[in-house]
């Protein structure tokens, strides 16, 4: 008798992205960014590729790679909305972009 078992990779998940400025009165502004409840149900998240974009420039910029679900960005105090996103890579080399699995957009307005 032969039995076939289909094994599927479960993709990483998260609940939200937290953006916390250290001191909004300073220029540049240090923003601490973290993923809340980032997990891979059937393995581990090996890396996080962080980036941001703005209302005036929708191209991804400011790339950072970490092996933990948090990082910091040093941003010039230029008036704009700064949107943050992360590409999570799991131990099966599957990549998941937070913008593709969530309808929410995570941003902060600098003035």
Image (spheres, rainbow, N blue to C red):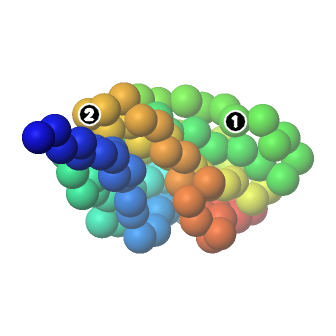
| Residue drawn where x is 34% and y is 52% of the image | 10
Looking at the rendered image, the disc whose residue lies closer to the viewer, 2 or 1, is 2
Compared with 32, 64 (above or below) is: above
Q: Is residue 77 left or right of residue 49?
A: right
| Residue drawn where x is 69% and y is 35% of the image | 60
Residue 73 visible here: no
Q: Determine which of the numbered discs, if any, sits on residue 97 in the image.
A: none
Q: Is residue 54 left or right of residue 88?
A: right
| Residue drawn where x is 45% and y is 68% of the image | 16
Residue 34 x/y as whole percent:
38, 56
Viewer-proximal residue among 15 and 63:
15
Q: What is the quadrant of the N terminus in the image?
A: top left
Viewer-proximal residue among 107 and 24:
107
Residue bearing the label numbered 1? 60
Q: What is the quadrant of the C terminus in the image?
A: bottom right
Mark 2 vs 1: CB contact within 8 A = no
Q: Looking at the image, which residue sits at the far left? A: 1
Neighbour class for label 2 at 10 Å: few (<14), some, many (≥20)?
some
Viewer-proximal residue among 12 and 16:
12
Residue 90 x/y as whole percent:
32, 38
> Within the image, what quadrant is residue 72 found in?
top left
Compared with 109, 57 (above or below) is: above
Q: Is residue 24 left or right of residue 39?
A: right
Q: In what element is the residue under mark 2? A: loop
Residue bearing the label numbered 2? 91
Q: How many marks?
A: 2
Q: In what element is the residue under mark 1? A: loop
Viewer-proximal residue among 106 and 25:
106
């Amino acid at each position: 008798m032969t039995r076939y078992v289909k094994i599927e990779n479960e993709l990483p998940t998260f609940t939200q992205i937290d953006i916390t400025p250290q001191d909004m009165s300073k220029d540049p502004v240090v923003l601490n960014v973290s993923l809340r409840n980032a997990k891979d149900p059937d393995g581990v998240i090996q890396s996080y590729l962080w980036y941001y974009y703005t209302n005036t420039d929708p191209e991804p910029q400011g790339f950072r790679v970490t092996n933990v679900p948090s990082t910091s960005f040093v941003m010039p105090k230029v008036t704009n909305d700064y949107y943050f996103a992360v590409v999570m890579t799991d131990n099966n080399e599957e990549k998941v972009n937070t913008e593709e699995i969530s309808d929410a957009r995570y941003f902060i307005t600098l003035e």
